[in-house]
Each structure stands twice: as C-alpha cells, then as structure tokens.
Image (cartoon, helix red, strand yellow):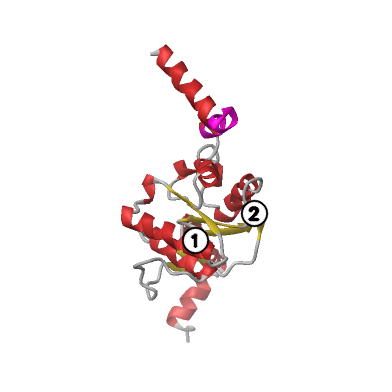
Amino acid sequence: MTVAVVVIATACAAVLGGPVCAARADGDPASDVLVAAPPLFLSFDSGATYAQKVALQRQLRHAAANGAPLRVAVIATRSDLGSLTALWGQPQEYAIVLGRELSLDYHGKLLVVMPDGFGLTRDGAPIRSPLSGLAPRRGLLITATEQAVRRLTGVTAPGASPAAVGAVPSRTAGAGWWVTTAAALVAIALAWTASLRRRPIGGRRDLAGGSPG
C-alpha cells in the first residue's frame, strides 16, 4: 500500500508538478479547476444535472467567442471552499481571494456564485456589478448562475428560459436577515415592556375606568 501511494504521488508530481499537487491538497478546489480546466467550477454538491453543466459550459464558451470571457465558480456548499471555509457566505470576499489567485494565469472577469449572493472581480479587484443586491432563489442555484452569466455577457445558455427568475434581493437570503429581524423584534418587545413598567399603576386604572366622580 505504501509503495502504491509513493508511486501515485510521484506520478502526480511528474505530470502536474509539485506546486499543483500541493495546492490541491490544502487550497481551494475552484482555483485549481479554473487554472487547469476553465472556465467553470461546478462541484457535485451543486445538484446540477449533466445537461445543465454542458449548457453552462457552452454559454461561457459562446461568451468568450463574442469577446466577453468570464470564469465562474459555483460554490454550493462550505466544503467547496477547501481550506477557505471561513469565506462561506461571503461571495464577494471569496471572489477577491480567488481572483488574485487566478490573476497570474488569467486576466479578466471572475464570477462567484453562492446561495447568499454573487461576487464579481477583475484580476482580483472588485468591479461594479449588475448583480449587486441579488441572490439565487432557494433551489435555483444553477438557474441563477445561467442568468447571472447572461446579464454579464449578453449570452443566454442553450435551452434556458430567458423569462425565468433566479434571483431575489440578498437582504432576504441566508441567516443574516433572520438574525437581524429577530433582533429587531426583541428590541421592540423590550422597549414595550419597559414602557409599561414606567407607566404608573394608578394611571392605567384611570385610563381604563375613568376618573372617579
């Protein structure tokens, strides 16, 4: 078994080079894929069908052929980030990190898609995005990716419905909105309770039954 592992490691180093193998061991998977086999990173956890994957790849190839190259990383789960799990739920921050990693080999736009929203950079620098404030609807991560690519490149995925909607305001997506809403409700309840405690008991009786004659 040990000999087999040594042989596999040696072959990996010979074919791919030591640094690449090391990156695969402790880095983020998307950076390796988007350097070696661009323009799309799409993990098994994304739930994409084979047809959807092919359609996205064709959409991106057509975009490149039309002068709008774009690389896309669909980050469906925390594990898709490899060693960068701290950036889960932060698509723009991850897009900056990933864009800088790719900038030695690729100069152009990078789109990151997470359930929480979209991140867009060029050579690792944030750029103005028509996707700002939007996030994929639950269960429509791939549809939202196709539509995001269409907004950025003007190219529609083969077989996709242009009328389909795959994005909603990001303020209602993810746990952050629920935490904020819950905190606001608690604050209102506390303020209401404090107001009742400050009001005199006699005052409440007068309001309820009127002043005695």
Q: Which amino acid does label 1 sit on?
A: Trp
- Return the x and y of residue 204 as percentages of the image width and height: 49, 74
**Is residue 190 in view from this perspective?**
no
Q: How far apart are marks 2 and 1 (CA)?
A: 35 Å
Res 177 label: 1
Q: Which mark is residue 28?
A: none
Magenta stretch?
16-24
Q: Give x and y (percent) for residue 12.
A: 49, 27
Mark 1 neighbour density, 10 Å: few (under 14) some (14–19) many (20 or more): few
Mark 2 Cα shell of 10 Å, populated few (<14), some (14-19), many (≥20): some
Which quadrant would residue 70 be assigned to in this image? bottom right
Give the secondary structure at mark 2: loop
The x, y position of residue 24, in whole percent, is: 52, 34
**Dot 2 corresponds to which residue?**
107
Identity of the residue drawn at 40% across and 71% down: 165
Vertical placement of 70 versus 75: above or below? Answer: below
Query: What residue is rendered at 55% in x and 63% in y?
Result: 194
**Most common secondary structure along the magenta stretch:** helix
Q: Does the magenta stretch include residue 147?
A: no
Q: Is residue 46 above or below residue 142?
A: above
* Quadrant housing residue 109: bottom right
